[in-house]
């Protein structure tokens, strides 16, 4: 049971008032197709000015993969996985309409949080999120990862390709975003659901017609009583070692940040071998009736505690 390796940093059941137990999942988000990373209003890619690396202080521009965008895709993905697994396990249809009408009874809602003004009997309900996203910064500078692509505009009514050609700024395939997803006071079931979601999520395109394919590879875990490293620090550290990108390199960086922690004795950096075993076990965990009963009843008791 490799998941047991994390047990000191997980809780038995989710609680409305959270403690310090923190698991940071370190992942590489690798772009597999031209991907538009921008906010809706602009045609430009989201970028940020940062130092080149930890050792080189000259400023460069990097593409920013906003945490809100990662979260939106992965929250939706987890909801779909839960819905399909629920149907397969004969739990009936459990519908959680994201944004407009959150159910606040499913593991997705318990983890990602949300508010809901119930029109029937209950008063306003609120669940605080226990999954935290941060903006990921491209490993390489903007100039090295950006591409302008021309496309045929498609008329939405006729579905025919129009004459108008448009331009989009996109991120090239093979662009790498070192990234971190942080879990606070979560259960083993919630960790499993998160890892499955990260492995399964593939499409992050702003416009569905244009690429947006990514692959997430989990390359590290660091657990403790606090967040040990931020996504920007991770990118700046990895830039200095970008010839040797590996789980080993990530673990070396995490070990170093352990010494900067407020509670270094509580920090555990996982070896690449341990990381692989945990990820494998999570991926192979069946979302069967027993698993689903457990995670749904956890949410039910959480809501009970809130009322009490
Ligand atoms: Zn829900």
Image: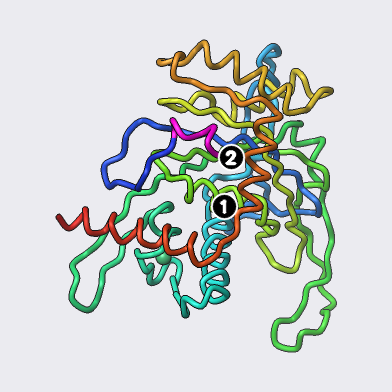
> In the rendered image, which quarter contains the C terminus?
bottom left
Quadrant of the picture in which ligand 1 is shown: bottom left
Q: Nearer the viewer, residue 199 or 71?
A: 199
For image coordinates 70% across by 67% down, the residue present is 208
Rendered location of residue 252, percent (x, y)? 67, 17
Q: Nearer the viewer, residue 87 or 200?
A: 87
On whether residue 4 falls in the magenta region, the answer is: yes
Against 230, residue 55 (above or below) is above
Residue under label 2, please give it. Answer: 1
Q: What distance separates the C-alpha of mark 2 from that of mark 1? A: 33 Å
Q: Nearer the viewer, residue 305 or 130?
A: 305
> In the rendered image, which quarter contains the N terminus?
top right
**Is the CB atom of the residue marked by disc 1 within 8 angstroms of ligand 1's nearest atom?**
no
Rendered location of residue 82, percent (x, y)? 52, 65
Going by the picture, which residue comes out furthest to the left? 308
Against 222, residue 162 (above or below) is below
Q: Nearer the viewer, mark 2 or mark 1?
A: 2
Q: Quadrant of residue 197?
A: bottom right
Start and end of the magenta stretch? 3-9
Q: Please, what is the dominant secondary structure of the magenta stretch? A: helix
For image coordinates 83% across by 65% down, the residue present is 151
Residue under label 1, please give it. Answer: 69
Within 10 angstroms of label 1, few (less than 14), some, or many (20 or more) residues? some
Q: Nearer the viewer, residue 177 or 17?
A: 17
For image coordinates 75% across by 18% down, the residue present is 240
Against 209, residue 244 (above or below) is above
Within 10 angstroms of label 2, few (less than 14), some, or many (20 or more) residues? few
Please tell me which of labels 2 and 1 falls first in the chain.
2
């Amino acid at each position: 049971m490799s998941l047991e390796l994390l047990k000191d940093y997980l809780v038995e059941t989710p609680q409305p008032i959270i403690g310090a137990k923190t698991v940071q999942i370190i992942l590489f988000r690798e772009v597999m197709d031209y991907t538009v990373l921008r906010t809706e209003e602009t045609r430009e890619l989201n970028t940020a000015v940062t130092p080149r690396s930890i050792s080189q202080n000259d400023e460069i521009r990097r593409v920013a993969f906003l945490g809100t965008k990662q979260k939106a895709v992965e929250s939706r993905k987890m909801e779909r996985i839960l819905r399909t697994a629920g149907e397969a396990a004969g739990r009936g249809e459990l519908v959680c309409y994201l944004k407009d009408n959150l159910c606040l009874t499913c593991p997705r809602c318990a983890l990602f949080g949300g508010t809901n003004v119930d029109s029937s009997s209950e008063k306003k309900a609120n669940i605080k999120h226990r999954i935290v996203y941060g903006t990921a910064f491209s490993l390489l500078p903007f100039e090295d990862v950006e591409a302008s692509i021309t496309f045929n505009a498609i008329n939405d009514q006729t579905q025919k390709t129009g004459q108008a050609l448009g331009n989009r700024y996109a991120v090239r395939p093979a662009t790498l975003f070192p990234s971190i997803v942080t879990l606070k006071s979560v259960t083993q079931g919630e960790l499993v659901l998160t890892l499955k979601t990260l492995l399964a999520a593939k499409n992050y395109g702003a416009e569905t017609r244009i690429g947006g394919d990514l692959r997430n590879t989990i390359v590290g875990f660091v657990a403790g009583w606090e967040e040990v490293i931020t996504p920007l620090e991770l990118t700046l550290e990895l830039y200095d070692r970008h010839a040797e990108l590996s789980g080993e390199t990530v673990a070396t960086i995490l070990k170093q940040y352990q010494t900067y922690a407020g509670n270094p004795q509580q920090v555990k950096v996982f070896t690449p071998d341990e990381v692989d075993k945990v990820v494998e076990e999570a991926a192979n965990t069946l979302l069967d009736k027993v698993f689903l009963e457990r995670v749904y009843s956890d949410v039910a008791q959480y809501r009970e505690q809130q009322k009490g």
